[in-house]
Amino acid sequence: MDRLHLFPDTTCIKNEKLVIAGCDLSTLADEYGTPLYVYDRVTLETATSIYQRTLKSSYPGKANITYASKAFLCLAMAQWVQKHKLWIDCTGSGELTIAVRAGVSREYILVHGVNKSPDDLDAAVQYAGTIVVDNPTELDRLSHLSQKFSLPSLWLRFRPGNTVDSHAYTQTGQVDSKFGMAWDEILHAGKLCREHDLPLRGIHFHQGSHFRDPSPLGFGIERSLDLAQELSLGEVWSLCPGGGWGVAYHEDDLPQPSIKLYVRFITENVITKCKTRGLSLPRLHLEPGRSIAARAGVAIYRVGAIKQTINRTWLLIDGGMADNPRHALYGSHYSALPIRQPERNNTERVWIAGPYCESSDVLIENLPFPKIETGELIAVPTSGAYHLSMASNYNGALRPTVLWLQNSRARVIQEREKLENLFCRDLGID
């Protein structure tokens, strides 16, 4: 069954039920309620291992992998990142605080952000090992901070002027993007760093997220290496060509995009183009984005009602855009399986929607599916990235329980919100 390839590596069918990491999903749903999110540790570690082994075999210089906090962050995930010696990118003081609370070492913390507040910069200077400078205003603020504090390493974020093939909302490298600095701005920033003795150590660029063809990165790499020459960064410097490598969300997207292809394209381009320019190999940093976390996560919902309209069969579930806004934002294309007897024949096409007061609260459209009954459970694969990190309390929704699955054991890493959480910030009026 093609859809099983969308699920975590440890997924199987046992006693006619979906099982992940030896855990029966229907049992978990009964115990912890729905909506419910589960993460398979084996899948996280397999993807990470492929990145690390491919980098080691294809790049002779030093290299690192950076986990994207924005994909999904909690204390447990940050602790897992630290254990595997991954860097962690944090946008703002909120994500940074979680990483610090989890015990992530300063040297592994990298801070991003297109408009870092004074509080963000203060926290970054105090706790981070690297700050990616997005704009001249930010660099000016850091220059003033350097008069009182020792700054971490600084990378300049370059806007190369082209993008990857992705949704318009996830493209970041174009000429008019809000992210990064143009060529002349980077050169001016480099000059300021020299004049004020700021610790400029690298160049970062990012052309977009969730892409399957790495070839546009060649342009960004080439332009960034030209900048490195212009800036005279020296023998020891860092280059980060962003990341955001794609994953398969639907059986039509299979096979899964090759991590090895992505890594080798970058390493070969960097090696070749450094050689032609007489540049020393930089410390190479990759940001895999969703390709580490997405397939490790599965969302579990219960069907509360089935509604038949003129042209559609609606499966109405107990979660939706409050825990996964990606379809509403990007029209993202998902798949699903029933947890009980997942190998049943598909006999109809269904639209799967949530309980919220928005017509955009639809997770899946026109999906071939078996005939199921009210009360059944369904599992939506590839739910590990950009779901819970973008979740909301719309309509008073409570963020779901999150489980960590390993060796037939389930561990709660985030508890379900309680009703009192919805007004814990409120002061009320007389």
Image (spheres, grey):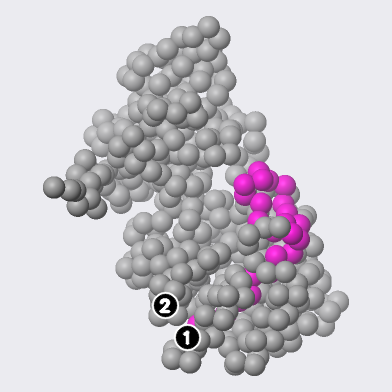
Query: Which residue is drawn at the image coordinates 69% and 87% (left, top)?
Result: 191
Label 2: how many residues lie within 10 Å, few (<14), some (14-19) or many (20+)? some
- The kind of secondary structure the magenta stretch mainly shows is loop
Q: Secondary structure at mark 1?
A: helix
Q: Residue furthest right?
A: 276
Circles 2 and 1, Cβ within 8 Å, touching? The answer is yes
Label 1: how many residues lie within 10 Å, few (<14), some (14-19) or many (20+)? some
Query: Which residue is drawn at the image coordinates 64% and 70% (left, top)?
Result: 157
What segment carries the magenta color?
150-175
Residue receiving disc 1: 145
- On residue 382, the disc is none
The kind of residue tagged 2 is Asp
Q: Examine the rendering and report whether any part of residue 53 can be seen.
A: no
Marker count (numbered): 2
Give the quarter of the image for residue 49: bottom right
Q: Secondary structure at mark 2?
A: helix
Compared to 9, does 317 lie above or below? above
Residue receiving disc 2: 122
Compared to 313, does 412 lie above or below? below
Query: Which residue is drawn at the image coordinates 48% and 56% (left, top)?
Result: 70
The kind of residue tagged 1 is Leu
| Apparent side of residue 27 relative to residue 13 in the rendered image (left or right) | left
